Image (spheres, grey):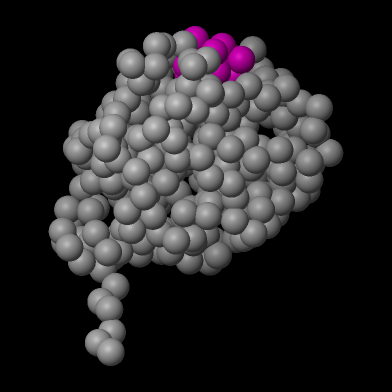
Amino acid sequence: MHLQWIRWPIIRCYSCCKPKEVAAKMAKYKLILLRHGEGAWNKENRFCSWVDQKLSSDGIKEAQNCGRHLKALGIEFDLVFTSILSRSIQTAWLVLEQMGQEWVTTESSWRLNERHYGALIGLNRAEMALNHGEEQVKRWRRSYDVTPPPITESHLYYHEIYNDRRYKHCDVPLEKLPRAESLKEVLDRLLPYWNERIAPEVKRGKTVLISAHGNSTRALLKHLEGISDEDIVNVTLPTGVPVLLELDEDLRSLGPHQFIGDQEAIQAAIKKVEDQGKAKPTLEK
């Protein structure tokens, strides 16, 4: 086991979750979660979802900085899990490269993909807030059990997604893959992979990194921390910031997740993500 690698008392962390009552006991396992670095459509404030996008120049820097930070803490990964979307995989590669751990086994699964936003894919969040109201956009983006309208074959990105070769190699038939998802549905398709593939490795004492997406990571945090359906709306994950979870023998969180890094910078990054769903009035010409 590698529980000794992190000198937590000297790290400034920030958690957006309220502390909860937990038994005073030592963590048996530690898990690092990571939302990928900023993608091209994150920069443009569009719903990216299952459209495959590479990292932006800022996203590359975020991933590299994350890797340097984790290396400085002496972390040695045994396994890395990613989605099958390029921004998740690229982030993991850059992190491992900075750590000098490119040789570490990486495994990818569609079950760690970003939430499928259906008909909303490609749309600008701020423009939608102007048209539909910020509260409606927030429900579509952040709520637990609200599913957006499904994608149809007439959608601009439908064929780009479902004709992609990667989706012919999933553990479910192409026609069974989602056309839209709530966060609850993301958790439903993620849990079998967590329970059958990732959790056993954590219980073997492996040091695991999960490089995924905002909503697949939020879904897993909800499960491991026991976050309520109502409170998950307020959980925000910035891009490229590693998250620590300390787990008991049953892989339940001993406390709120912690963002590893400078608190002030992380708070600013969280606000940036939250502001993506706010209307930005256009100036009259």
Relative placement, left or right, of 239 versus 280 is: right
Quarter assignment of residue 218:
top left
Quarter assignment of residue 270:
bottom left
- Outermost residue to the bottom: 285
Residue at image location 25% in from the left, 87% down from the top = 284
Q: Position of residue 120 (x, y in %)?
A: 28, 46
Q: As displayed, is residue 201 above or below residue 138? A: above
**Quadrant location, the C terminus:** bottom left
**Quadrant location, the N terminus:** top right
Question: From where the camera sits, is residue 21 visible?
Answer: no
Q: How many marks?
A: 0
Magenta: main secondary structure equals helix
Relative placement, left or right, of 135 versus 234 is: left
- Outermost residue to the right: 100
Relative placement, left or right, of 206 versus 170 is: right
Residue at image location 49% in from the left, 17% down from the top = 168
Residue at image location 39% in from the left, 16% down from the top = 174
Q: Nearer the viewer, residue 88 or 50?
A: 50
Q: Nearer the viewer, residue 74 or 213?
A: 213
Q: Nearer the viewer, residue 238 or 111?
A: 111
Residue at image location 76% in from the left, 32% down from the top = 76
Q: Is residue 30 magenta?
A: no
Q: As displayed, is residue 278 above or below residue 71? A: below
Q: Position of residue 156 (x, y in %)?
A: 34, 43
Q: Nearer the viewer, residue 90 or 16?
A: 90
Q: Position of residue 117 (x, y in %)?
A: 31, 40
Q: As displayed, is residue 198 above or below residue 134? A: above
Q: Which residues are magenta?
A: 193-203
Q: Position of residue 161 (x, y in %)?
A: 43, 33
Question: From where the camera sits, is residue 46 visible?
Answer: yes
Relative placement, left or right, of 185 versus 34 is: left
